[in-house]
């Protein structure tokens, strides 16, 4: 295996972990809202973390997709 292949494999693995964490946060936010026991500050922090994860996911997806010139 080349170093590039190993690097892409590690990025794919990290991407899968980030997607799972993003889904978990989404479920946590929904559960807090449904119970009605969530405090506004806690929800804001979770949503901010979710947005940060989304940004990290987008960066990794961009790195893994080859540049295609149409």
Image (tube, rainbow, N blue to C red):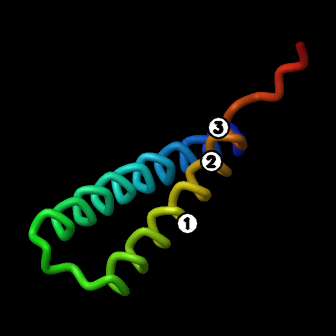
Q: Nearer the viewer, mark 3 or mark 2?
A: 2
Q: How far apart are the alpha carbons under marks 1 and 3?
A: 26 Å
Q: How far apart are the alpha carbons under marks 1 and 2?
A: 10 Å
2 to the left or right of 48: right
The residue at 38%/73% (across/down) is 46
The residue at 34%/76% (across/down) is 43
Mark linked to residue 52: 1
Residue placed under numbered mark 2 in the picture: 58
At mark 1, the secondary structure is helix
16 to the left or right of 26: right
Mark closest to the chain's N terminus, 3 or 2:
3
Q: Position of residue 58 (x, y in %)?
A: 62, 47
Mark linked to residue 5: 3
The residue at 67%/37% (across/down) is 64
Mark closest to the chain's N terminus, 1 or 2:
1
At mark 2, the secondary structure is helix
Q: Nearer the viewer, mark 1 or mark 3?
A: 1
The residue at 42%/46% (across/down) is 16
At mark 3, the secondary structure is helix
Q: Nearer the viewer, residue 14 or 22?
A: 22
Q: Nearer the viewer, residue 61 or 9?
A: 61
């Amino acid at each position: 295996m080349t170093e590039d292949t190993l690097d892409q494999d590690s990025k794919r693995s990290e991407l899968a972990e980030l997607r799972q964490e993003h889904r978990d946060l989404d479920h946590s936010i929904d559960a807090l809202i449904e119970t009605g026991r969530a405090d506004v500050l806690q929800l804001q922090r979770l949503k901010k973390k979710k947005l940060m994860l989304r940004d990290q996911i987008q960066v990794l997806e961009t790195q893994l997709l080859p540049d295609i010139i149409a």
